[in-house]
Amino acid sequence: MKRHLEDEAATIAFGRELFNAMPDDLAGWTILLAGELGAGKSTFARAFIRAAGHEGPVPSPTYTLVEPYKLSGNTLYHVDLYRVSDEEELRYLGWNELDDGCRIVEWPDRAPGLAEQADLSLVFSYAGDGRDVEVVPLSDRANRVTVTTNRSGEESSVSP
Ligand SMILES: Nc1ncnc2c1ncn2[C@@H]1O[C@H](COP(=O)(O)OP(=O)(O)OP(=O)(O)O)[C@@H](O)[C@H]1O
Ligand SMILES: [Mg+2]
């Protein structure tokens, strides 16, 4: 599924909408956010985390690598692998212990093996003044997630 995000507000709306389309229990889910510098990954992550009930700032995990959000319904882990150059480093950031929550991962291409254990891949790209997002389900349970593909409200599974 591909969707055009005409401005920042559309990226925020899409983050909220995808959260609302997800199952209630997100433990063990992994969502990959790919795309070049400035493509909108953090804008999406912030909206998703706020939709889950977090109020207040959503600091960049670029230096801490992981920012945890223990919310009433779910635990979310905002992960940024920008500074990770080697898959081994995932162990140092405690990746395996993050399976009680939903991992939202910026720069997943730094650890290519992640795709095998992820549920959803979101690829953001520049499109005119706005952005496009391509949503690719990577697991059976992700195939059952349904979001609207456009503002007119047509519903579509995230699978093609
Ligand atoms: N759909 C959109 N159209 C236009 N601008 C957008 C859109 N979505 C987000 N932006 C803007 O793009 C800029 C970069 O967004 P953001 O920080 O989310 O990107 P990023 O992919 O996380 O970048 P980085 O790789 O540097 O962390 C911000 O100013 C944001 O407001
Ligand atoms: Mg970012």
Image (spheres, rainbow, N blue to C red):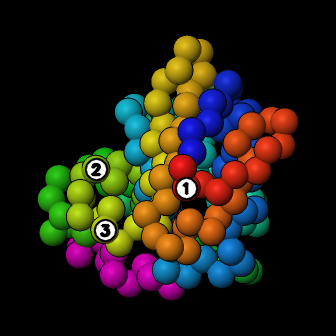
Secondary structure of residue under mark 1: loop
Q: Residue at x 46, y 70 (%)?
A: 139
Q: Earlier in the sequence, mark 2 or mark 3?
A: 2
Q: Give the Cα distance between marks 3 and 1.
A: 17 Å
Residue with the mark numbered 1: 159
Residue placed farthest to the top in the image?
128
Looking at numbered disc 3 in the image, what kind of residue is underneath it?
Glu
Task: Kindly tell me whether mark 1's CB lies below 8 Å from ligand 1.
Answer: no
**Relative to residue 126, is residue 135 depicted above or below?**
below
Bounds of the magenta segment: 91-104
Looking at numbered disc 1 in the image, what kind of residue is underneath it?
Ser
Q: Position of residue 88 (x, y in %)?
A: 15, 69
Q: Residues within 10 Å of mark 2 (few under 14, many from 20)?
A: some
Mark nearest the camera among 2 and 1 is: 1
Q: Position of residue 20 (x, y in %)?
A: 75, 62
Q: Earlier in the sequence, mark 3 or mark 1?
A: 3
When asked about the image quadrant of residue 18, the answer is: bottom right
Q: Residues within 10 Å of mark 1 (few under 14, many from 20)?
A: some
Is residue 102 found inside the magenta-colored segment of the image?
Answer: yes
Q: Position of residue 82 (x, y in %)?
A: 31, 47
Is residue 112 found inside the magenta-colored segment of the image?
Answer: no
Q: Residue at x 60, y 54 (%)?
A: 158
Secondary structure of residue under mark 3: helix
Q: Nearer the viewer, residue 43 or 15?
A: 15
Q: Give the Cα distance between marks 2 and 1.
A: 21 Å
